[in-house]
Amino acid sequence: MNSAPRIVFAGSVNTSRTALESIVAAGGNLVGVLELAPSASRNVSGFAELSDIAARAEVPIVRFEKINSPEVMTAVERWQPDLLFVVGLSQLVADELLNLPRLGCVGFHPTLLPEGRGRAPIAWLALGQARGAATFFLMDAGADSGPILAQHPFDVSPDDYAFDIEEKVNQSIREALGQWLPRLNAGEWAPAPQDHSQASYLGKRTPADGHIDWCLAATDIAQLVRAASRPLPGAYTYLGNAKLIVWQATIVENANIQGIPGRVLNFDSDKRPLLQTGNGVLRLDEIDIVCDSLDTPKLRVGSQLGYSAEDEVHRLRKKVAKLEAKLQRVIEDLELSEFRTE
């Protein structure tokens, strides 16, 4: 290469911002930015805009709802990139777009590839199911399986929340790109194939996986809270008709109180609720109560979180029985009315 490769960047989340800022800071030859439109960000955890970074770098930007749209294809063809970075974007990139950059498309994954390929890596890292690393690789037809371009490991503590891990990911992105991009600009190009025999995979997670089962041990619930916390949707339970999201929680050591799992035992001096679990007591350090009505329920000593399946089924059966009785009376009244008319 006689000059720095031309770079186009696409992304939609906080790590996208960090990667784009790092490319600019390292002197990358940025020629265009593709930004997910806010209108398409409804289900994107940790959504972040990129337009301000593009403006400071004085490069053109195109907003998109679908990465494979004709508008994106036209823009990328016009920018004639050597590399297309795709960081923090859940949409799949079509082959037609993958084939446009001269050298290829650069993907990103926050695990020590080939370990931990796949979905929801931040949550799985918090659950101890992979080792962390800011890994940039050449995208191919597989899932996170292409040759590695840059990789900077980081440690995950058992006490790390998802937001702690995200900050470690961001710092490792800065380190990885800060070391690799100057070499790339100098003409180094040495993608290293992954050892596929060492690959492991992480399965899909959904917001429903953050549901709290209060019969689990306090250690398990605390780990779930850490794994589902910001920028993810949060671990959750129910308080009456409201949804209660738990963002942070702490295990209470040597608690001198015992109760029913899911029930508020007491409050500490800072008015934080203490909850009984299947084994141990958990203090809820940060919560949000989300309610559709104006009458938001309040946590009190004795409040029961979550639902009892049998109690809920019994309640619904009683409600259905009442509705059936009302319907039967309406039918009988209609039949009597028709008889009188005749």
Image (tube, helix red, strand yellow):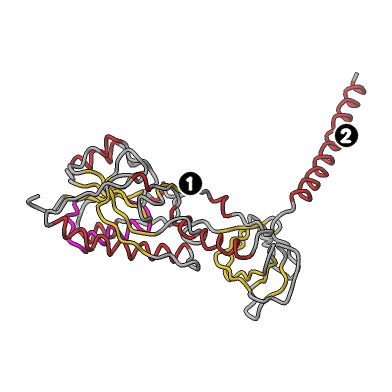
Residue 224 shows in this picture: yes
Looking at this rendering, what residue extends furthest in the left direction?
2
Q: Is 224 above or below relative to 302?
A: above
From the viewer's perspective, tell me whether residue 228 is left or right of residue 88. right
Residue that numbered label 2 is attached to = 329
Q: Where is residue 266 in the image (x, y as percent from the top left)?
A: 71, 74
Locate the C terminus by quadrant: top right
Residue drawn where x is 37% and y is 62% of the image = 169
Q: Residues within 10 Å of mark 2 (few under 14, many from 20)?
A: few
Above or below, comparing residue 102 to residue 50 in the picture: above
* 201 to the left or right of 95: right
Say what secondary structure mark 1 lies in.
loop
Q: Image quadrant of residue 221?
A: bottom right
- The answer to whether residue 256 is left or right of residue 206 is right
Residue found at the very far bottom of the displayed protein = 269
Magenta segment boundaries in residue numbering: 11-31
User: How far apart are labels 2 and 1 at the CA level?
Assistant: 52 Å
Residue corresponding to mark 1: 203
Residue 299 magenta-drawn?
Answer: no
Is the residue 68 above or below the residue 42 in the image? above
The disc label shown at residue 98, or none? none
Residue 248 at x, y percent in the picture: 55, 67
Q: Residue at x 61, y 59 (%)?
A: 290
